[in-house]
Image (cartoon, rainbow, N blue to C red):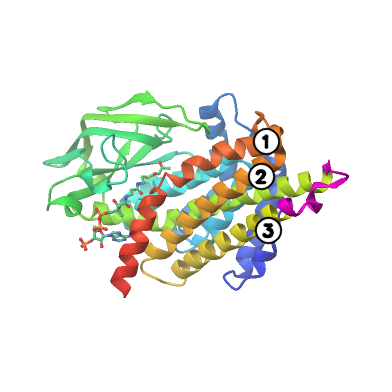
């Protein structure tokens, strides 16, 4: 079992400590079959959504009024859940994360009608959620999106293309960001909920990645939705996307931390049990240096993640800088930790099926999705310049 001493830190309340330990018990038995890549990833995701829902973990993705646990999204809980799930199953973490991210903009800014229509079903696993911002020519530069939504009486008509959309192909609905043109640039984007079975929405390509999960390119061709599917105020879509990402970027850091903790556990077992030059590997100082750096990276990540989460839970309107720091540091650190774990395992570390080999594939995307490391550096710099 991983080190849980961080739970004594003052960032947490007793409810968080209880949650982490209860989930740890559950994940240890219930996720065993999802510890490595399944043959049918879509089916596994569908099963995992229902499994997470049944056990009550998706209650943390929505607020109390819609069947959730907390009156507002509790970022510490979301982070603890992602950290724990990621230690046992990258796919379970992915499924949980997407129910949260794909419904987050509705929770934060949606009308009561939209919340009632989607959030209870997200919580029960009846609806699978997705977040559609990225486009073929607009990744890091999110304001450059070209998908349009034109109002036509009581409808909006969407045209354009989104890509690298997680849950694409299995989602029941997509939170879509599109140009509505109220003002230039970031002030002319709005957010919508588009049901997957709406005429004019098509999955144009499924995309295979190094750590398999459902991912797709989506095309909107004269896709007509009622105006009641708009989230919040027209023209505020970019800010809504960023505010949603402020919450979920901290949780990406937490998932990376879970992967890193798993890698350290594997490395510790290996170095204590493997004999080398007449003694356990753990006696070698070069190995100790690696373990020391891995452990330091893990604690530093954890401090930044739970600082960001605690700050939001304690009422901060924005945690843009804190979340960017948490995501940047934790994902880069986890890559280092996992790479060292592979090195410690030597040849076995790159053999398919070894835990560290899988972690090596799992971690890579986290340094890119929800804002690449380079974007996080820009955000930290711009916030720091504003503050000083
Ligand atoms: N909260 C509220 N408002 C915010 C905000 C936040 N966190 N961040 C920015 N804004 C506001 C700004 O205050 C500004 O408002 P005003 O014009 O009124 O002052 C407006 O939004 C524009 O902000 P910027 O000037 O910073 O905009 P920019 O164009 O320079 O953005 C960027 C720069 C930070 C690089 C942004 O484009 C970005 O975050 N890019 C990364 C995109 C990303 O993360 N994509 C993730 C896709 S989803 C995904 O990966 C999920 C998945 O599949 C698993």
Residues at badges 3 and 1 in contact (C-beta under 8 Å)? no
Kindly identify which residue carries mark 1.
349
Q: Which mark is residue 292?
A: 3
Q: How far from the left and from the top, in percent, is residue 207?
A: 41, 27
Is residue 101 depicted above or below 47 in this figure?
Answer: below
Kindly identify which residue carries mark 2.
341
Residues at badges 1 and 2 in contact (C-beta under 8 Å)? yes
- Closest to the observer, 318 or 71: 318
Question: Is 279 within the magenta?
Answer: yes
Residue at point 49%, 64% (across, down): 309
Q: CA distance from mark 3 to mark 1?
A: 20 Å
Q: Is residue 150 left or right of residue 173?
A: left
Q: CA distance from mark 2 to mark 3?
A: 12 Å
Determine if residue 91 is in view. no
In primary-sequence order, the first of circles 3 and 1 is: 3
Q: How far from the left and from the top, in percent, is residue 177?
A: 27, 44
Q: How far from the left and from the top, in percent, is residue 135?
A: 29, 37
Q: Which residues are magenta?
A: 274-287
Determine if residue 176 is in view. yes
Looking at this view, name the residue that lies furthest to the bottom: 388
């Amino acid at each position: 079992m991983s080190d849980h001493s961080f739970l004594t830190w003052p960032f947490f309340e007793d409810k968080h400590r209880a949650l982490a330990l209860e989930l740890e018990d559950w994940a240890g038995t219930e996720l065993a079959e999802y510890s490595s890549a399944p043959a049918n990833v879509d089916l596994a995701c569908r099963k995992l959504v229902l499994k997470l829902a049944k056990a009550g973990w998706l209650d943390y993705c929505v607020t109390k009024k819609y069947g959730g646990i907390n009156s507002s999204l509790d970022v510490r809980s979301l982070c603890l859940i992602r950290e724990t799930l990621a230690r046992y199953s990258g796919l379970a973490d992915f499924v949980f994360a997407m129910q949260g991210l794909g419904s987050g903009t509705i929770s934060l800014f949606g009308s009561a009608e939209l919340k009632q229509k989607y959030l209870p079903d997200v919580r029960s696993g009846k609806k699978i959620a997705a977040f559609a911002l990225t486009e073929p020519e607009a990744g890091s530069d999110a304001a450059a999106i070209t998908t349009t939504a034109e109002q036509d009486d009581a409808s909006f008509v969407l045209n354009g293309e989104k890509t690298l959309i997680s849950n694409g192909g299995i989602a029941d609905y997509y939170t879509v960001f599109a140009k509505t043109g109220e003002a230039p640039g970031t002030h002319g984007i709005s957010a919508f909920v588009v049901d997957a079975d709406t005429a004019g929405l098509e999955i144009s390509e499924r995309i295979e990645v190094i750590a398999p999960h459902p991912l797709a390119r989506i095309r909107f061709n004269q896709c007509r939705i009622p105006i009641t599917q708009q989230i919040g105020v027209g023209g505020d879509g970019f800010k809504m996307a960023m505010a949603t990402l402020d919450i979920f970027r901290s949780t990406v850091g937490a998932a990376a931390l879970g992967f890193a903790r798993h890698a350290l556990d594997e490395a510790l077992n290996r170095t204590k049990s493997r004999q080398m030059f007449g003694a356990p590997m753990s006696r070698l100082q070069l190995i100790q240096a690696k373990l020391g750096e891995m452990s330091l990276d893990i604690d530093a990540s954890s401090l930044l993640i739970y600082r960001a989460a605690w700050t939001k839970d304690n009422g901060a309107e924005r945690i843009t800088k804190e979340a960017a720091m948490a995501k940047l540091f934790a994902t880069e650190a986890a890559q280092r930790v996992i790479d060292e774990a592979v090195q410690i395992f030597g040849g076995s570390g790159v053999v398919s099926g070894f835990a560290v080999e899988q972690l090596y594939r799992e971690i890579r995307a986290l340094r890119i999705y929800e804002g690449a490391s380079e974007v996080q550096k820009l955000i930290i710099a711009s916030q720091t310049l504003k503050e000083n």
